[in-house]
Each structure stands twice: as structure tokens, then as C-alpha cells.
Amino acid sequence: MAKAKTAHKSGERTPRKSAPSKSTSRKSSPRKWSAKVTKTSDAMDLEQDVFKSDSPKHIAASVKRSAERSRRRKSSPFRAAMSMLTFYGNRAGKNLSASRRRVLDAAKNQLRRLFHRPAAG
């Protein structure tokens, strides 16, 4: 025999069933969104192809110049410039060769020198 359902006491609620879950698959985002950010950053106008340079001094000087000229940045020129270098290195990720990574790391150190900041340690 089936059990009889018991009446709920006043004030008790019946548990709700959860809403059906949405599909877990997402539409793929555009592949090169970070390239667009690098080109069209609202915070700074970067010199074209600045990250392609093999000179850490040239990269650091260019990013510093862009950060100091910008009136749209939200932080200090040093932080804006360092953030752009870090962003570029992080977004390139595993596609960045060891030699390019060394150039970017050297550019960060050069940027610290240009802004009279202590070396990272």
C-alpha cells in the first residue's frame, strides 16, 4: 500500500524544484580580444608595434611616454605603463617565446629605472 501524504503544518513550505539548468556550453568568444584591447586601449595610445621591438629600452620609453601623455588613465603613469606590459605578457601566454618574454621582463626592469622605482625582488 502507498503511504498517505501527510498534511503540512501551517507556515511550512514545500521544497521547490530547482529551475532547469541552462546549457553549459558557451558561444566561443572572438579569438583575439586581447589584441583589440592592446590596439584600442582606452587608457593609453600606444605607439604602433611597440611590443615587436627587440629593445627593452625602446619598449619601456615608449610605454612610459604613452602613460604620461594619457589623460584617460585611472592610475599613476607608472602603474598604467606597468599594467600594459604585464597585460601584454599575460595575454600572449604560452605563445610568447622565451626570448620575447626576456625582452618584456627587461622592459619592465627598464621601466622601473625610468620611473626611479626599486627593482623587483
Image (cartoon, rainbow, N blue to C red):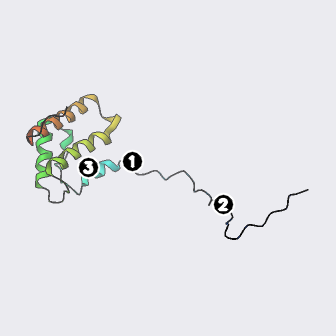
Callout 1 crowding tier (Cα within 10 Å): few <14, some 14–19, many ≥20: few
Q: Amino acid at mark 3?
A: Thr
Of circles 3 and 2, which is in front?
Answer: 2
Circle 1 is placed at which residue position? 31
In x, y percent, where is residue 62? 12, 45
Q: How many marks?
A: 3
Nearer-N-terminus badge (3/1)? 1
Callout 1: helix, strand or loop?
loop
Q: Amino acid at mark 2?
A: Lys
Say which residue appears at 60% left-offset and 56% top-offset.
21
Which quadrant: the N terminus?
A: bottom right
Which quadrant: the C terminus?
A: top left
Nearer-N-terminus badge (2/1)? 2
In x, y percent, where is residue 50? 18, 43
Circle 3 is placed at which residue position? 38
Circle 2 is placed at which residue position? 17
Give the CA separation, mark 2 to mark 1.
38 Å
Say which residue appears at 78% left-offset and 67% top-offset.
7
**Label 3 close to label 1 by CB (< 8 Å):** no
Above or below residue 71? Residue 107 is above
